[in-house]
Amino acid sequence: MNGPTATIDLSAYRRNLARLAERVAPAALMAVVKADAYGHGLLPVARAAVAAGVAWIGTLDIETGLELRENGIPRDVAVFTWLLGPNEDYGRAIEAELDFGVSTLSQLEAIARASVSGRARVHLKIDTGLHRNGASIEDWPGLVTRSLALSDRIELVGIWTHIAEASDGDDTVAIERFRSAIAVAERLGASVTVRHLAASAAAFGRADSRFDLVRIGAFSYGISPGGGVSPSSLRLEPVMTLTAPVIAKEEGLATLGIGYGDGIPSSAVGTVQVSIDGARFEVVSVQLDRLTVDTGDSPIQLGDTAVLFGSGTAAEPTLQEWADQLGTIGEEIVTRLSPRIRRRFLE
Amino acid sequence: MTILPVSRIHSASIDLLAIRDNAAVLVRRAGSRIVVADVRADAYGHGLTAVIGAAVDGGACAPDIDSAASLGPDAKFVSAGSALYGLLPDLELKPAMRVSALVVGTKTIDAGESVSYGYTWTAISRTNLALVGIGYADGLDRIASNRGSLRLRGALRRIVGRVAMNALVLDLGQDSALIGDEAVVFGDPSTGEPAVWDWASSLGRPSAEIVSVFGSHLPRVYR
């Protein structure tokens, strides 16, 4: 019997990328494939992005960036990494021609020390209000000046930030702070070609957030931000369909072979539905490796396939519905799925 | 035993001696019944092969994977799941999984400044923050935003702002931390670390779910 399966529609992914690329042009698009491509499967997704002409890939960490290079993502595709730990092996990463998103002087110095053959590609990060990574406005001139002084080892490629998307007004403030930081860097002698601030929602909605490059994760997978905004209202298509087999059937209940050990939140009880043969059923229990749905008198058969969420075209629940009903965002649901769930790729 | 690549930023560390010793305790308590290790869901995220080895060392039986789930309350067998992994507050049992992550950034913000997506938390006075490299894609539930705490530098520190996919922010107040410090989500309560059942109950989830999800996403390190 087949186990739980996440079917990944790579053609939907490519169509999303094409629509987003058209929308954000002339800014370039970075395809973000962190967290195993949002649970969709790193290598097939990254290869699809490259085949679709994407010239930037964002991996978050160095290890994932190296994995892409080792698996043939070509050197003319920039691979951007930005979660940098205190003990990174930058030598290998520089050899693999990864790009680094740098927030602190100590990161910059460590990269410069490791950069013995050729120059390391660096994007300096300014904190524009999110207060996670990024140099403070006070530390910014020092970081820029030092990277320019290290120009025999450091190629200053970009300046970037992350914004909170709390409100349009807050984002406007962040964009203004970003422009100021760029102006400060230019006065100090920097000439950067790649300025990037926006992720999916801002890139989609605000032309003034796009600069030279936008970083697109969620929207490329057809994951919308919620709050009434559906993928179709953005002309995006959900990429993942999650299915599980009916492994037991008795007294109006059907048991599916997927559970919280596979990443289904236990809070799905009483909140979400699944679809079997076009009809919807409530989840009444979630256990380690199984969940139970109330099927009433419906003629469910052992071996039927339940759709937990999908594109919605066959009346099945969508990821957006799950997210809304679970009080979270689609990103959490897909990244939480266990890597042990089989990924099946449709070209 | 499969040892996954060691991430320097976050990991689920698995104490195989704890699993062995827990198995021995359960075998003793079971008397004449046979204790069978429940290793569904990749041994509750602890790693199938390693757990079977440790549980067998402690005197438990390795299950036939296909039928383990259906053993049921057979008089001759007793299935050991949560207890084997030390997920219950029982003084004879030791939690096997410890989840921790490193501080990857530090920052001081002024009163009125906010943190993370949606600016759901705003500082009421000048305060020190630590950015920790773990998030919901690693298994740290997003509902822990502005609710859960991690232990860092000897005290519980509250998560402020939304937990992001790969990072979260802790409020340190007037204390400070250094990049590279370790923040513990849960570990061994006998050493003062938070217990997995406290973390789980603060989020309204079963402990088995917490360890299964972390264990399937974080790099596992065996002790």
Image (cartoon, rainbow, N blue to C red):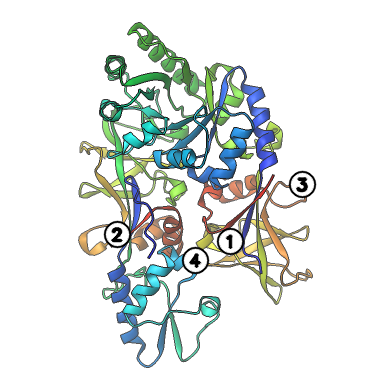
- The residue where tag 3 is placed is A313
Q: Amino acid at mark 3?
A: Thr
Q: Secondary structure at mark 2?
A: loop
Residue at 22% in and 64% down: B190
**Residue A246 location in percent, x, y?**
68, 68
**Front tag of 4 and 3:** 4
Residue A148 vertical position relative to residue B105 in the rendered view, above or below = above
Per the rendering, the mark at residue A300 is none
The residue to which callout 1 is attached is A269
Q: Which residue is mark 4?
A: B41
Subunit that carries the residue with mark 1 = A
Left or right? Give the position of B83 relative to B69. left
- Indicate the position of residue A34 as horizontal and vertical percent values: 49, 40
Q: CA distance from mark 3 to mark 2?
A: 45 Å
Q: Is residue A118 visible?
A: yes
- Labels 3 and 1: the sequence-earlier one: 1
Callout 3 touching callout 2 (CB < 8 Å) = no
Gap between marks 4 and 1 measured at Cα: 19 Å
Label 3: how many Cα within 10 Å (few below 14, some 14–19, many 20+): few
The kind of secondary structure element at disc 1 is loop
Q: Quadrant of the N terminus of chain A?
A: bottom right
> Which secondary structure, mark 3?
loop
Amino acid marked by disc 2: Gly
